[in-house]
Amino acid sequence: MSNSRKSFSIAEKIEIIQDYDKTQLKQKDFAASKNITPSTLRSILKRRNEFTSATEGKDRKKIRTAKHDQLETVLKVWFTQARSSNIPVSGPILRGKAQEIAQFLGISDFNASTGWLDRFKNRHSIIYRKNCRVPKAAAAGPLGSVSDWKEQLSSVTEGYEPTEIYNAAEFGLFFKLMPADESLATYKTERCRGGELSKDRLTVLVCTNSTGSDKRKPLVIGKYAKPRCFDNVKTLPCIYASQSRAWMTSVQFSTWLHDWDKELEARKKPNILLFVDNCAAHLKVDHLNHIKIIYFPPKTNSELQPLDRGVKTVFRQGYRRRAVQLYLQEMAASKKPKVTVLDAIHFVHASWRDIKPATIENCFKKAGFFGGSQSGSQATQVESEMGWETLVGEGSVPELDMFLDVDNNLVTSEITSHESLVEDNLSHAEEEDEDEPAPRSAPKSAEVVDALKLIRHFFTCIPNVEDDVFDKISYLENSIFQKSLNLKKRKRNS
């Protein structure tokens, strides 16, 4: 091996990363095969996200960063929104908007010159065309109406297996709402574009393939980046992000897609077809190698989107059922019922997990996929009301439909002004929700084992308990034991 230090371009570093991901070799052996030192390889792999997400000229040796990175981040999102909304954006308009953002950020040494504009376009791979317009067909997807959709859907999905066809959608959730909440009627009419109620809502993105065999981990978006209940928490069953109004943004949607695309690449999975609505957050996403996006025609979600044909209803029923369980348990213990963001994330995970593949397949067929009929009710009512009366008891809740559908009108995204984009990149990311209860300290392993013993004893005192209940308790005990061993090994090695 040569001892001389070689300088690689960004493109060459990306190629090394991709080749390494495809091989089964150890780092030392792979480095030798590339005639580089192991330390060089480790350095490249450590910065893999930085290199693979680079958008400027990849023949460069180094990634150049902008002097005013925050300004350019906001401007890029604003530009992408405008272009995807078919709003003409010329060079002078882009420079003028950059100057506005600079003033709003209080940047006094910024000059939106033509030279800066050229560098900005190079950094963000913006190909300048007259008016920078996006053709309407590209903005709305290949299918323009319900009738066109019915006729062309089979040809659009041709070549893809049912396991490779996905639908993703967001919905709002008043996560703190309890069945006896006096403000239920107020929530019912609320669209929640900001204000105090933004602390009480989340936006949840769910995604599944048409067979229900791959239900992606939900993405939960809250107002605060660091809720107090997250102290001592290192693992969550959902992806969590924050935004000042708890909305989905084009940046979050793009990040979610690119992470999924990289996963498909690393796991050597087949390409997939993803159907989404054409809301403000679902802008055109570049540099996807394994995901093809198809947009539903405008204002057709209730008819054509599978997740709107019953899956969301069943999900909300599962979430509300768990809220009621907590309500009854806390009331029985003479405690004031309260749902934290952490509670909500676990409710979201469990509610999504419990949706049956048959329900998802049925909703895809109701939306017209695979020759299915678009007639009929949206959801299987038997499943969406299952166990409700048993849980809450007579008179414990208001009208069931009102409690289930209270957040149907919540806004989950909008075209965002540059002022709001700046706010999203500033202080809210460090805020905490002061209304959240004080965080719980991390329990010790012995305390958890004792708690499991109590749970086991609880079930032994009940007749006719299924065997798998005790199997699951044993599984948890084994998991705790193994995690404890691993922690001790890490402490000894550190």
Image: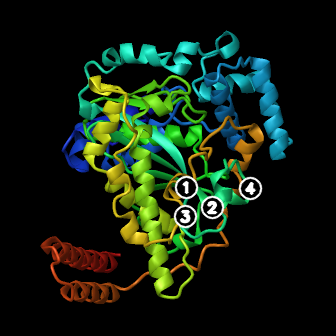
* Front residue of this view, candidates 294 and 404: 404
Q: CA distance from mark 4 to mark 3?
A: 26 Å
User: Which dot marks residue 256?
Assistant: none
Q: Earlier in the sequence, mark 2 or mark 4?
A: 2
**Pointers 3 and 2 in contact (C-beta within 8 Å):** yes
> Tag 3, which secondary structure?
loop
Q: Earlier in the sequence, mark 1 or mark 4?
A: 4
Depth check, mark 2 against mark 4: the one in front is 2
Q: CA distance from mark 1 to mark 4?
A: 23 Å
Depth check, mark 1 against mark 4: the one in front is 1
Residue 183: x and y in percent read 66, 64
> Tag 2, which secondary structure?
helix
Q: Which residue is mark 3?
A: 398
Asked which quadrant contains residue 33, the reply is top left
Q: Which residue is mark 1?
A: 402
The residue at 21%/40% (across/down) is: 23
Q: Is residue 210 visible?
A: yes
**Pointers 1 and 3 in contact (C-beta within 8 Å):** yes
Q: CA distance from mark 2 to mark 1?
A: 8 Å
Q: Is residue 441 visible?
A: no
Q: CA distance from mark 1 to mark 3?
A: 7 Å
User: Which dot marks residue 184?
Assistant: 2
Q: Tag 3: residue type?
A: Pro
* Front residue of this view, candidates 131 and 122: 131
Residue 334: x and y in percent read 52, 88
Q: CA distance from mark 3 to mark 2?
A: 9 Å
> Tag 4, which secondary structure?
loop
Q: Tag 1: residue type?
A: Met
User: Which dot marks residue 195?
Assistant: 4
Q: Tag 4: residue type?
A: Gly
Asked which quadrant contains residue 125, the reply is top right
Residue extending farthest to the front is: 394
